[in-house]
Image (spheres, rainbow, N blue to C red):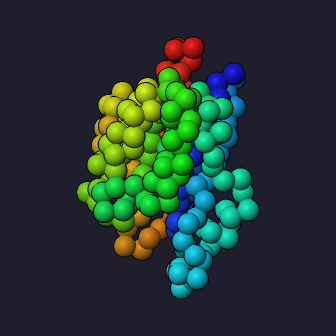
Amino acid sequence: MTKVAIIYYSATGHGTSMAKHLEESANQMEDVEVRVRHIAETVDPEVFKQNPAWTSNYEATKDLPAATGADIEWADVVIFGSPTRFSKVASQFQAFIDSLGGLWAQGKLANKVYSAFTSSQTNHGGQEITLVSIYEIIMHFGGIIVTPGFTDPVKFADGNPYGVSHVTGAANQNEVNEETKAALTHLIQRAIGIAKKLD
C-alpha cells in the first residue's frame, strides 16, 4: 500500500479545489491510501471577514483535520500545495514547514517522494519560482523530488514542467479547468508510480 499525503494551504479555495482533484486522481490507482490535510489558518478571521471567498473556504475547512508533521512521517508520497505570495509560499505554509524541525533532525522527512502545486491570479505571477522554493525546502529534508517534467502530452498543454499551477484570473474563480485537472492527475499518478518503483 502506497500512502499519499496531500498537504496544502488555501486562503480563497483554489488550493482546496486542486487538493480534492488530486485526491480523486490518486484514488483511481490500486493499493493507494490517501490523506488530505489543510494547513491551519494563522490569520484572525476578523481580518478577512470582508473577503467572501476567504471566509467561505475558512468555514468549509476549519473543522477538518489540519496537517501535522505526523502526516508527512506516515506518508510515502507527499504533495505540497501553496498559493504564490510575491513569488514565495504563503506565510501559513512556511509556518507549517517551520514546525517540522524536530522531524527533520531525526531524518523522518527524508527518502519520501515529493511534488507540488500552486496558484496565482495571473500568468507569470510567480508560480514556477514558488514551486522551486518548495523544492528547495525538500532538498533540506533529503526528499526525492518528482516533477512532472514534459513526460506526458498534457504537460505541453499546461506548459509547467515544475509542478501544476492554477491561474485564478481577475475574477478569482475557484473552478479548475480541464487542462489543469489533467495536469494534476498526471502529477500525482507520476509521483505515486515513481514511489512504487522505489519501494
Residue 27 seen in this snapshot: no
Q: Residue furthest left?
A: 124
- In the displayed orientation, state which residue is furthest to the right: 63
**Residue 127 position in % (x across, y down):** 33, 52
Drawn side of residue 66 relative to residue 105, left or right: right
Query: Residue 62: x percent and y percent?
Result: 68, 64
- From the viewer's perspective, is 181 left or right of 29? left
- Residue 17: percent from the left, percent from the top? 56, 56
Q: Quadrant of residue 63?
A: bottom right
Which one is in front, 54 or 153? 54
User: Residue at (32%, 43%) from the top-left corner?
Assistant: 132
Looking at the rendering, in which quadrant would you find the N terminus?
top right
Which residue is rendered at x = 43% and y = 59% of the image?
90
Would you place residue 148 above or below residue 199 in this image? Answer: below
Q: Measured along the vertical axis of the image, is residue 193 above or below residue 83?
A: above
Residue 166 locus on image (x, y percent)? 41, 55
Count of numbered marks: 0
Which of the two residues, 174 or 117, is positioned nearer the viewer here? 117
